[in-house]
Image (cartoon, rainbow, N blue to C red):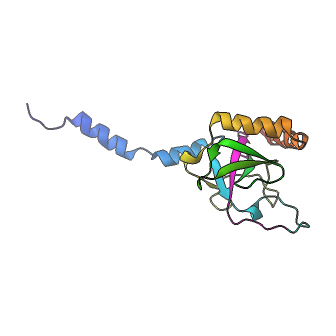
Amino acid sequence: MTDKKSPSKTAKKKAAAKKVPASRKEKKRGVPVGRTLKTQDKYLPYKKSKVQELKAKRWVVVIDKNTDEELAIVRLTDEKQPNTTHLPTYRKGNRKDTYFKHFVEIEDSEGNAIRVDGKKFLENAKAYDLSDSEINTIQNVVYHRVKQSQTNNEKIKRLKSKDKKK
């Protein structure tokens, strides 16, 4: 017997080398709930009449989506502000305490559905995903415990109703 590899093992290695990389597979499955995205405040809805400073870097988290990969997001911040809640178990990439805002967004500043497009909304690495318990905490607060909950629930219903129209 020789120490040469059998043809079947070589064929298996060649077939494995031709397979689609994992990074492309993830894109086809879509953005999971709990994934954080990078964007800029100018791409998110805001009141133009109000003078406010728009951040050039903003992290948001996906809290829901429909089958067409249209996303419902909540903004993350590391500053204690009005209409924010502390997320004690999560630290953003800068290792600071993280807060989430109480407003659910389903459209960008131009009125289009929010999708990961590589320009306005970019996916962060999987290491920055929020856990299921953190997502449940955010959903519980924005859907039931804040004064904006009725508006937030209406936005989620609109997002989910787009599934039924197709």
Give 100 or 62, whichever is nearer the viewer. Answer: 100
Residue under the image location 31 percent in, 43 percent down: 14
Query: What residue is shown at x 73% (from left), y 55% (from top)?
Result: 79
Compared with 126, 38 (above or below) is below
Residue with the most extreme left position: 1
Position of 28 with respect to 75 (left or right) is left
- Which segment did they paint magenta? 52-71
Which quadrant, please, contains the N terminus? top left
Tell me what residue is drawn at x 69 percent, y 47 percent.
61
**Closest to the observer, 110 or 12:** 110
User: For residue 54, which quarter of the picture?
Assistant: bottom right
In percent of width and height, residue 52 lies at 83, 67
Residue 69 makes an appearance in the image? no
Q: Position of residue 136 (x, y in %)?
A: 71, 34
Query: Looking at the figure, which quarter contains the C terminus?
Result: top right
Left or right of residue 49: residue 110: left
In magenta segment, residue 57:
yes
